[in-house]
Amino acid sequence: MQYIEYDRHAIKTPPSSLWLEGWRVDYLAFSSPENAHKPPLMVVGGAFQNFTSYKYSVERIYQDFPVILIDLPSLGNNDQLGPELGM
């Protein structure tokens, strides 16, 4: 995974995408160089939220761990509708 360093503008960076079994997962992955070797904390976006909703969380988590924000189909800014997907 390719991490980028976090700053106030990085949260608005266009997300990277990963395709899994025909579904697109959008994500932003942040880490400072000194923490890149640590396991990341993954934040799963919810309905009506976008990556900027987690700005303050990322600012705090980023100090200690890498953080990955993901938008799954039908959530956040991911415009794919997946009514057959569930928990």
Image (cartoon, rainbow, N blue to C red):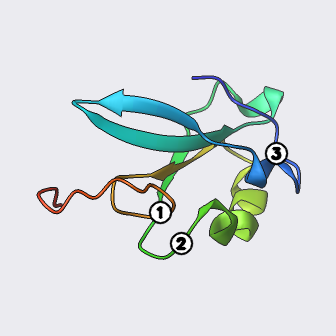
Q: Name the mark on residue 57.
A: none
Residue visible at 34% across and 53% down in the picture: 80
Left or right of 73 in this view: 54 = right
Q: Is residue 4 above or below residue 84?
A: above
Q: Please state which amino acid type lies under the numbered disc 2.
A: Gln
Q: Dots 2 and 3: beta carbons under 8 Å?
A: no
Using the image, determine if residue 38 lies above or below residue 26.
above
Query: Taking the image as drawn, is residue 31 in sight?
Result: yes
Report how far apart the C-alphas of labels 2 and 3 lie in the structure: 19 Å
Where residue 7 appears, x then y in whole percent?
A: 88, 49
Q: How many marks?
A: 3
Q: Quadrant of the N terminus?
A: top right
Quarter occupied by the C terminus: bottom left
> Which residue type does callout 3 highlight?
Tyr
Q: Point out which mark residue 6 bears.
A: 3
Q: Residue at x 75, y 45 (%)?
A: 13
Secondary structure at badge 1 equals: loop
Residue at x-position 16% and y-position 60%: 86
Closest to the observer, 60 or 78: 78
Residue 73 location (% of width, % of height): 34, 53
Residue bearing the label numbered 2: 49
Report which residue position mark 1 lands on: 45
**Is 4 left or right of 54, judged from the image as shown?**
right
Q: Are marks 1 and 2 in contact (CB under 8 Å)?
A: yes
Secondary element at tag 2: loop
Number of other residues with Cα within 10 Å of mark 2, as a class: few under 14, some 14 to 19, many 20 or more: few
Q: Locate residue 21 relative to residue 17 in the image: left or right.
A: left
User: Residue 9, position in %: x, y?
Assistant: 87, 53
